[in-house]
Amino acid sequence: MSNPSAEYARELVATLVERGVVDFVLCPGSRSGPLAHALAEAGADNPPLGAPSVNLHVRIDERSAAFLALGLARGRAAVGEQRAVAIVTTSGTAVGNLLPAVMEAHHAGVPLILLTADRPRELRGVGANQTTDQEGIFGTFVRWAATSAAPEDRDEPGRAALLATQAVAIALGDPARDDMTGTPGVVHLNVEFRDPLGADNGVWNDPPRVDPHPSQGSFGTPVVAEPEPLPDVERGIVIAGDGAGDVARQVAEAHGWPLLAEPSSGARAGDACIGPYLDLLATREGQGLADRIHQVVVIGRPTLSRPVQALIARAPALMVAAHGARWREAPRHADRVVRAVPRRWTSRADGRLELGDSAWLREWRQAADAVVAEERPWGRRAVARAFLGSLGAGDVAVLGSSGSIRAADRIGPVWEPGQAPVLLANRGLAGIDGTVATAVGVALAANQPVQALMGDVTFLHDVGGLLIGPREQRPRLRIVVVNDAGGTIFGGLEHATAPAANVERVFTTPHGADLASLCAGYGVGYRLVTQADALGTALAVPPVAFEVVEARLR
């Protein structure tokens, strides 16, 4: 015999799928049992009659599971599919463990739907087990939050369908809205369930047809006045941060301005791109060029280096577009801030400038060609160079947010337009947490071989992301771990001037972990390399399974 909780869970899942959600990450728990049973049926090899088909990913650690969901959403987007990903947890601390990934997704504009199970009203505030204040627990880090009262026998169909419809629309972003909810992000549905929570062998019905409540936004196409074109100054520069896209290259080339593009910008290509820009800015000639800039155009969210932040801070004129999910959080001295790059920015008022005619760009290119960066034969830069050199057009890779992406930034090649790989990184808040799980999610969603590059501390911070149950889909993923025995990135910061013993204990934090044993325990393939040519051999063919390559520097 069916029960209200089970019927509600089936309607919720079926509507989410109908609205485009195909990936569900589930963590085990009792209070979330109705959703777990529904997803077990929908995720089975042979779903029951009427049940939707979903990609179900089961993980035991909610923190890692949330980053897996984030990676799934990013992987979908990387191959041209913008879809929200749902996460299911039970009540209590399980919900709190989602917060790090929620914060990253909020700032990076990644669409996630949190389905957190809760006790019914009569069991809240009376000391019931695994019960806490889950309503509003994620604060401003979600685009929208709602609590659904426990289903009753007398409920008419459609309540879960309405909630799911609203959730997907808001998670994907409503372009008609001019506030922060107009970009993709996180939605939290706190769902109360009353006993019984078990399976009921009920039937799957087609979800009722509903429309989002008008108060949740129009979900239409906005009418926005076309911004003015960029001033045609001679000495402009384009800075492409995370998520900028190829349009940043188009803007730079149209105006004959140098392009400084971070690895995860998606814009590191073309003849205007200055590959070794960081090493150039460290020279006297580079500083001289920087001092002569008349206008800075920032596209995307640049966060990697202090020299670039210094360029932005002293820009005589500053134009900002697509500055992350919270696009209005641009530098306060910006002259113009827009949500997306206007079409008129990709051309000049007097027509396209041939790059060969730009004396300003020629100066930057000549100065960059003269830069000779110091590089050890076996170090972080050498590993990053081999890693990036193994990637081709259409390949997808994940970069850790600490030393690895900065090494890639310094040595990354400049690709021909249309020939660059897709480089992803968690730059919303630029934390190192959840990187392994994110990479797993990217590989599963992209459905192709994926490689990831990260440091040893980043790897160990999320080593639990290696845990994939025997009944779960395994990715074709190779993780290259740069093991230099701790967080050596701090050696390049002001903390390095403190006593060496103090720096080592509270910043570098050497770990002494045996990565081979960890991989063996999790059933993940492992390979050790200690020199550049061995790494090149290890990267020569795409991964066919889940494996770790330890590039040991010490």
Image: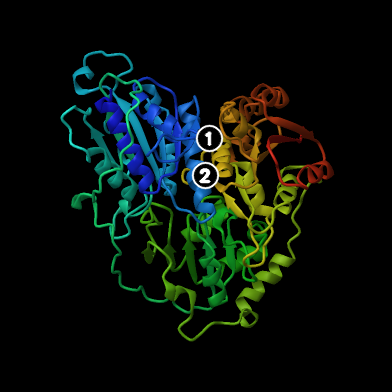
**SS for dot 2:** loop
Q: Amino acid at mark 1?
A: Gly
Q: Reading the chain from its start, which is encountered first: label 2 or label 1?
A: 2
Quadrant for the N terminus in the image? top left
Scheme by which the image is coloured: rainbow
Is residue 516 shown left or right of residue 112? right
Residue identified by numbered label 2:
426
Can residue 511 be seen from the camera position used here? yes
Numbered label attached to residue 434: 1
Q: Position of residue 6 (x, y in %)?
A: 30, 28
User: With 125 as the anchor, is 413 left or right in this view?
Assistant: right
* Dot 2 and dot 1 residues touching (CB under 8 Å): yes
Q: Residue at x 19, y 19 (%)?
A: 122
User: Which quarter shows the C terminus?
Assistant: top right
- The residue depicted at 60 percent of the width and 82 percent of the height is 354
Indicate the amino acid at tag 2: Asn
Relative placement, left or right, of 535 versus 136 is: right
